[in-house]
């Protein structure tokens, strides 16, 4: 859940499903752009979390409503729990017929397919047959029988999805298949909100959708020289406590972690991140993975894929993304922090209970 606290620390805490923002701006003009001392802010509960939009450009308060409208629009299309959504329509017609999707929904479909192919089966857009059994984070959450999971696994295969770009259609080959964009939709929507901001000439702001944060422009927009300090949530402490921070501008920071949505049953903790190969939640030595990227949709998908791979394989996988300007932070159960090569000199450790590893 997203909370916001305005302090003087210039810190934005990034959580898997929650965050705390600390923001500053100036009312001095820069190239005819004026900024407000106290930002315009709007909060709404959407996509199962508190979404907070913040703008520092003077006279741009109305853009907050446009940003929220963008979230609602795509949430209506991509949410499984809403009857009649585009995703629901695709799933209902699994094994029956291809479904045409709206033009603005098609890029999300293509991104989901790209990461399904690129992650070596760590991310699968057809995970819905499994997540529908567990429903972690929803009122009906439960531990499915092993027989149920085994029956669902053959339906988890993105290779059984037929995309027709020319006609913008999606066809799921097998009855019972289900797309689930829980691991990518918030990132895609954050990017669309950023576009809404930019089209309306917003130069400084923060988009916070659960564990997805996008920092636009500078934290001191009047000078244009200071990047935002984006903190990484301490997994062992209350929301708003960080283990360290990175300095970024016009970048997305997304975290997937074990400490937010989970199910406790029979003395065991089952997290919301599902392994498409086993049908069970991930079990490895990680407590969180944070992705720093230009596009939030990349960070959303990659945080799940990297978590699935575990520390060693995840680091190797993410270091290959360095040329694309995508970086990662891994926190282990042993309180050790590992960062990809591109973050060296950027990530600053602030909680010395944790150890930054070479």
Image: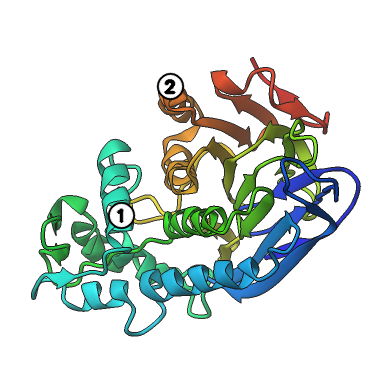
Q: Is residue 62 above or below residue 120?
A: below
Image coordinates for residue 330, horizontal then vertical, percent: 59, 33
Q: Residues within 10 Å of mark 1 (few under 14, many from 20)?
A: some
Quickly name the residue at label 2. Answer: 323
Residue 222 numbered tag? none
> Viewed as shown, does residue 45 lie left or right of 306?
right
Question: Residue at the location (46% across, 23% down)?
Answer: 322
Image coordinates for residue 109, horizontal then vertical, percent: 28, 57
In depth, the one of 126 and 35 nearer the eye is 35
Question: Residue at the location (65% across, 46% down)?
Answer: 215
Quickly name the residue at label 1. Answer: 107
Q: Quadrant of residue 88?
A: bottom left
Q: Residue furthest front?
A: 32
In depth, the one of 55 and 252 nearer the eye is 55
Question: Residue at the location (32% across, 65% down)?
Answer: 128
Q: Residue furthest right?
A: 8
Image coordinates for residue 90, horizontal then vertical, percent: 22, 72
> Viewed as shown, does residue 6 lie left or right of 299?
right
Q: Are marks 1 and 2 in contact (CB under 8 Å)?
A: no
């Amino acid at each position: 859940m997203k909370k916001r606290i305005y302090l003087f620390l210039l810190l934005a805490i990034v959580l898997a499903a929650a965050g705390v923002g600390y923001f500053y701006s100036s009312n001095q003009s820069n190239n005819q752009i004026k900024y407000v001392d106290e930002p315009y802010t709007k909060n709404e509960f959407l996509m199962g979390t508190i979404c907070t939009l913040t703008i520092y450009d003077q006279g741009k308060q109305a853009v907050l409503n446009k940003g929220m409208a963008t979230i609602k629009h795509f949430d209506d299309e991509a949410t499984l729990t809403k009857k009649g959504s585009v995703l629901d329509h695709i799933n209902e017609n699994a094994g029956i017929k291809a479904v045409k999707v709206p033009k603005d929904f098609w890029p999300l479909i293509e991104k989901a397919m790209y990461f399904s192919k690129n992650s070596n089966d760590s991310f699968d857009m057809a995970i819905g047959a499994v997540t529908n059994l567990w429903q972690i984070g929803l009122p009906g959450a439960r531990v499915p029988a092993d027989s149920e999971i085994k029956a669902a696994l053959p339906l988890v295969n993105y290779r059984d999805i037929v995309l027709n770009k020319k006609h913008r259609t999606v066809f799921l080959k097998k009855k019972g298949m289900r797309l689930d964009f829980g691991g990518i939709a918030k990132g895609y929507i954050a990017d669309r909100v950023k576009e809404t901001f930019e089209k309306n000439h917003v130069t400084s702001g923060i988009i916070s959708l659960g564990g997805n944060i996008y920092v636009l422009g500078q934290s001191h927009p009047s000078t244009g020289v200071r990047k935002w300090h984006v903190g990484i949530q301490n997994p062992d402490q209350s929301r708003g406590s960080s283990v360290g921070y990175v300095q970024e501008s016009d970048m997305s920071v997304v975290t997937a972690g074990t400490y937010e949505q989970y199910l406790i049953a029979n003395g065991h903790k089952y997290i919301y991140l599902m392994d498409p190969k086993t049908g069970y939640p991930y079990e490895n030595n990680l407590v969180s993975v944070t992705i720093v990227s230009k596009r939030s949709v990349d960070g959303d998908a990659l945080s799940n894929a990297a978590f699935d791979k575990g520390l060693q394989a995840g680091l190797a996988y993410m270091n290959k993304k360095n040329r694309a300007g995508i970086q990662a932070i891994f926190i282990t159960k042993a309180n050790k922090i590992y960062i990809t090569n591109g973050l060296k000199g950027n990530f600053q450790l602030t909680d010395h209970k944790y150890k930054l590893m070479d």
